[in-house]
Image: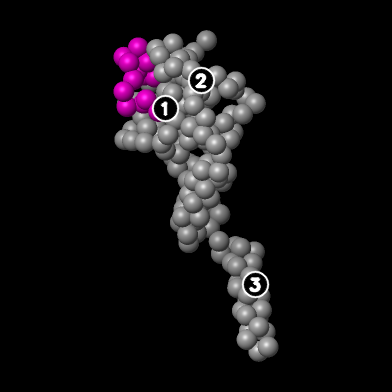
Amino acid sequence: MKFLFGVIVGAVLVVAALAAYFVTGMAPAAVNDPPMPFERLIAGAALHARIARVKAQESPIPADNKNLLAGADEYNMDCAGCHGLPGQQKTDIAAGMYPHPPQLFHGEGVTDDSLWEIYWKVDNGIRLTGMPAFKGMLSDTQIWQLSELLAHANALPDSVKKELAPNAPAPK
């Protein structure tokens, strides 16, 4: 009986300490604050577990020049402000966000993610990151075109690279 009482008191104390951490302003809330303990681990684990629960789909469109160019146009309009363009420095918007959005044309980007995972992230967004859900704002085809573009970001044809150049004309 004493053991059970001790467990209950211990649990109440842990909950009270966590509540105090948040309501007293000790928890980091500003973009420039260091991350909370285990924040990245918990958020990453939750995201990957959620994506794994959903049955992966195959892309209904080919990664051809037409679809990659359409993906580049959409990327320029909706993604480049946060995720950058090839050969461009991080934008002020990206520098002011926490967590910082990955620069998708620098380094690996998301080319190491499955096409389905990229699609899921664009379609659903990612909580607590600033990554919006494009479901309902873009058509399914547009989301697949963006996903194909990002999945092939390290091996794009020159015509698509030209469309993603920092000085490329704004899409019509």
Spatial CA distance of label 2 from label 3 is: 50 Å
Q: Looking at the picture, which amino acid does disc 3 mark?
A: Ala
Identify residue for label 3. 16
**How crowded is the residue under tag 3: few (<14 C-alpha within 10 Å), some, or many (20+)?**
few
| Mark 2: secondary structure | loop
Q: Looking at the picture, which amino acid does disc 2 mark?
A: Pro
Total numbered circles: 3
Q: Which mark is residue 60?
A: 2
Q: Quadrant of residue 160?
A: top left
Side of 32 where 105 appears, left or right: left
Identify residue for label 1. 150
Range drawn in magenta? 150-165
Quarter of the figure with the N terminus: bottom right
Residue 24 x/y as whole percent: 62, 66
Spatial CA distance of label 3 from label 1 is: 44 Å
| Mark 3: secondary structure | helix
The first of marks 3 and 1 along the sequence is 3
The first of marks 2 and 3 along the sequence is 3
Q: How is the image coloured?
A: one colour
Side of 125 where 95 appears, left or right: left
What secondary structure predominates along the stretch shown in magenta? helix
Residue located farthest toward the bottom when viewing the structure as drawn: 2
Residue at 53% from the left image edge and 24% from the top image edge? 143
Q: Looking at the picture, which amino acid does disc 1 mark?
A: Leu
Residues at badges 2 and 3 in contact (C-beta under 8 Å)? no
Depth order, front residue of 87/2? 2
The first of marks 2 and 1 along the sequence is 2
Depth order, front residue of 82/127? 127
| Mark 1: secondary structure | helix
Residue at 50% from the left image edge and 55% from the top image edge? 42
Please tell me whether residue 102 is drawn above or below residue 8 in the rendered image: above
Side of 164 where 13 appears, left or right: right
